[in-house]
Image (cartoon, grey):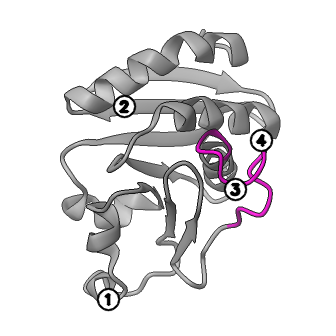
Amino acid sequence: MGYKIQVYTKSVAETISIGRSLGRILSSGDVVCLTGELGAGKTYFVKGLAGGLGVIGIRGKGVTSPTFIIIREYKGRLPLYHIDLYRIGVVEDLRDIGMEEVIYGRGVTAIEWAERIADRLPDERIEITLRYEDKKTRLIEMTAFGRHHTQVLKKTAGELEKIADKR
């Protein structure tokens, strides 16, 4: 198992802030895999990543879930490829849309519902699971796999304490 951080957020704004903190540190080729129940905050987290990458303002306005088109690209200091696998039917269809080129490309890739392609994910990645604790509180577990991603999470850890409750 990789290096792990757990934080609790009590609002959408905190979830976005956590994502923004991580986004500021991400570099070319980084892959962020998001899992969690419907409505747990995966897309809000990606809005934060976008803000941290300088995509669209500080809150990632304009970043929406690409549920029906599967992949959206946003321009920032690095390209952000936002993939949503919620409606994906056959995993083999992913080759047809160029997902492997995106994941192993020059930008940052954020994959919602990443568990649907668990056997195809790169060995080096950050996995983020969002869980409901109660109506307002979310547990965000971030696990880094690989040396580079471990360093990314370690750099992010100090900033996260200012934003959310680590319990």
Q: Secondary structure at mark 3?
A: loop
Q: Is residue 58 above or below residue 46?
A: above
Distance between the alpha carbons at the discs numbered 3 and 1: 25 Å
Label 4 residue SS: loop
Query: Foreground mark, 3 or 4?
Result: 4
Circle 3 Cα neighbour tier, 10 Å, few/some/many (<14 / 14–19 / ≥20): few
- From what the image shows, is residue 103 above or below residue 14? below
Sequence-wise, the earlier of marks 3 and 4 is 3
Q: Nearer the viewer, mark 1 or mark 4?
A: 4
Q: Position of residue 84 (x, y in %)?
A: 52, 69
Mark 2 or mark 3, which is nearer to you? 2
Quarter containing the N terminus: top left
**Which residue is denoted by mark 3 in the rendering?**
39
* Disc 2 to disc 1, C-alpha distance: 28 Å
Residue name at image x 47 percent, y 61 percent: 113
Q: Is residue 120 left or right of residue 84?
A: left
Q: Is residue 99 above or below residue 21?
A: below
Q: What amino acid is labelled 4 in the image?
A: Ile
